[in-house]
Image: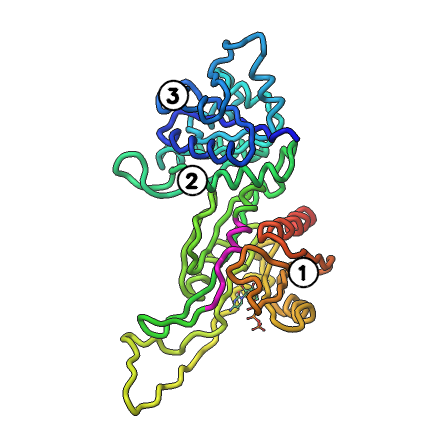
Amino acid sequence: MDKPKVVLGVSGGIAAYKACELLRRLTESGHDVRVLPTANALRFVGAPTWAALSGHPVETEVFEDVHEVPHVRIGQQADLLVIAPATADLLAKAAHGRADDLLTNTLLTVRAPVVFAPAMHTEMWEHPATRENVATLRRRGAVVIEPASGRLTGADTGKGRLPDPAEIFEVCRRVLARGTGALTPDLAGRHVVISAGGTREPLDPVRYLGNRSSGKQGYALARTAVARGARVTLVAANTALPDPAGAEVVPVGTARELQDAVVKAAIGADVVVMAAAVADFRPAHEVRSKIKKRDGVEPEPVALVRNPDILAQVAARHPARPPVVVGFAAETDDVLAGGRAKLARKGCDLLVVNQVGDGRAFGTEENEAVILEVGGPETPVPYGPKEALADRVWDAVARRLTTA
Ligand code: CTP
């Protein structure tokens, strides 16, 4: 079988050096990659580097090898075009259909999915001109990955960093897996809020009540949603996983912090998915200093109080309710009956039920579940990667969004 053909466009920003790592990951995982740097990109990383890492000659101008009409050939043959880093200037040219070099010409001939990974200073990213250009590209079906926050070139920090190349690679892999020719990702223009991980309820300054959720399923949902074009807010409770490229990550600790973050993010959102394991109870009193053992004295019992039910709150019928609300249910016994009862009780539209215990689900890479739907089918998802389950959840969500 032919290797999938990826075109890697590189525009002129300092993050161009990080695209070498993306290129290496793409080639090592069996993709045939053509690199199209802009003239300014070559001021940061030279043509020999791109040629050596891709195994192909590197062209920048339409006037090289004119007899082969390279911008048409490369564009038509591509299964994916990814531009990393995408500068403000490149986004502007793409949004306006300008074509003054080989990369921008190819952008007009390509019919495969296009992924932009912008990187620039915060002010440039937030400028209304850039905002409008990004909105235009997303409306047309391109996946524009939100930049990461952190240290920028020089001493300043803020939003605008190129996400980790490993995470951009994950987005590319998923966009490719969804099939070529998919011009419009089905979550384009949607804002989805996902909670992940497990809350911790402090007992004293060193101890907490927690649970065994790793956050992997929620992160898989975030990654797949980015690849399907969504804007993603990921509320992450006590996870130790790399930030998915393009997702805005809001770290939280306790159930009440998670509640604040989810309820705030849910305003105006299209979808809320509660994949986090939320503690139902918290210690009634948080002791300010460490609880000490004392010889001959029995320990005090820990009094617990109920935490808010965040899923039920978000799913309650009110004018600002997000159109689709999804819950997860981890059950140890009587999985389906318990799931059906929970779907009705929580008021959500979809409930993903899985069996836990005996080493199943927690911390593993794989999962098995049944997706229950109000007024819809029950969809069993066989044992497999958490990403595959995530994609089946988005299939069901996308279907409901189009009929909502
Ligand atoms: N959930 C929530 N707030 C809580 C508890 C749970 O939002 N205080 C959400 C979870 O994120 C999940 C769903 O509710 O999406 C089901 O969680 P689960 O722990 O299975 O449900 P419980 O309400 O705790 O039900 P039970 O105690 O009967 O198992």
Mark 3 is on which residue type? Gly
Mark 2 sits near ligand 1, with its Cβ under 8 Å away? no
Q: Quadrant of residue 183?
A: top right
Above or below — where is 137 with respect to 364? above
Q: Which residue is mark 1?
A: 370
- Cα distance between the residues tagged 1 and 2: 33 Å
Quarter of the N terminus within the rendering: top right
The structure residue drawn at horizontal position 40% and vertical position 33%, both measured from the top left corner, is 18
Few, some or many residues within 10 Å of mark 2 (<14, 14–19, 20+):
many
Quarter of the image for residue 153 reads top left
The x, y position of residue 344, in whole percent, is 66, 68
Q: Give how far apart the Cα atoms at labels 1 and 3 are.
A: 51 Å
Q: Nearer the viewer, residue 318 or 369?
A: 369
Near-viewer residue (78 or 194):
78
Verify whether residue 213 appears in magenta.
Answer: yes
Query: How far across and how far down the image is residue 256, in percent?
Result: 43, 66
Question: Residue 51, percent across and down?
Answer: 45, 21
Q: Nearer the viewer, mark 1 or mark 3?
A: 3
Judged from the image, the secondary structure of the residue bearing numbered disc 2 is loop
Q: Could you tell me how far apart the alpha carbons at marks 3 and 2 are, in whole angstroms?
A: 22 Å
Name above or below for residue 273 compared with residue 243: below
Dots 3 and 2: beta carbons under 8 Å? no
| Local SS, label 3 | loop
Query: Residue at label 2?
Result: 163
Q: Residues within 10 Å of mark 3 (few under 14, many from 20)?
A: some
Apparent side of residue 34 relative to residue 324 in the rendered image (left or right)? left
| Region in magenta | 211-222
Farthest residue, direction bottom: 296
- Sequence order check, earlier mark of 3 and 2: 3
Dot 1 or dot 3: first in sequence order is 3
Q: Helix, strand or loop at disc 1?
A: strand
